[in-house]
Image (cartoon, rainbow, N blue to C red):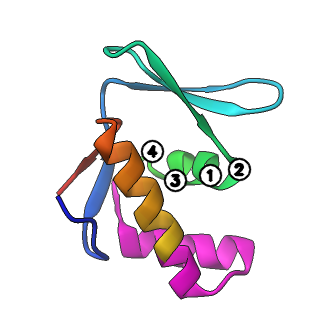
Amino acid sequence: MEIVENTELRRASRAAYGELPEESVLLDIEGEKAVRLNETGAWLWKRLETPATVAELAAALAAEFGIDESRALADVSAFAADLAGRELLETD
């Protein structure tokens, strides 16, 4: 599926989030794999406690980190595509 601004994102039930002293990780409890999250990825994951669209997350990311909205949109889209491809995010 193509990730666009109005794509709604939600956490997949197979994903478990954990914070370690120096990093954050997502665990795929079905595939038994781990994915490291950078600061931005961890922030986005926490925001997805409730489902949100790519555009909503991008606007919040731009406001939080003081970056251009087009850059935030690209970052959120890349994050969503990566985790959806790993089946850790579900999309509508």
Q: CA distance from mark 2 to mark 1?
A: 6 Å
**Which contiguous range is marked in magenta?**
50-73
How many C-alpha atoms fall within 10 Å of the one at disc 2: few (<14), some, or many (≥20)? Answer: few
Nearer the observer, 62 or 84: 84
Label 1: element kind: helix
Q: Are marks 4 and 3 in contact (CB under 8 Å)?
A: yes
Query: Where residue 83 sits: x, y (%)?
Result: 39, 44
Q: Are marks 3 and 1 in contact (CB under 8 Å)?
A: yes
CA–CA distance between discs 4 and 3? 5 Å
Pointers 2 and 1 in contact (C-beta within 8 Å): yes
Residue 54 location, quadrant = bottom left
Q: Amino acid at mark 3?
A: Arg
**In the displayed structure, does residue 89 sit left or right of residue 17?**
left
66 magenta-colored: yes
Q: Which residue is mark 4?
A: 49
Q: Which mark is residue 43?
A: 1
C-alpha distance separating marks 1 and 4: 11 Å
Up/down of 39 relative to 28, above or below: below
Residue position for label 2: 39
Instruction: Provide the residue designation for mark 3.
Output: 47
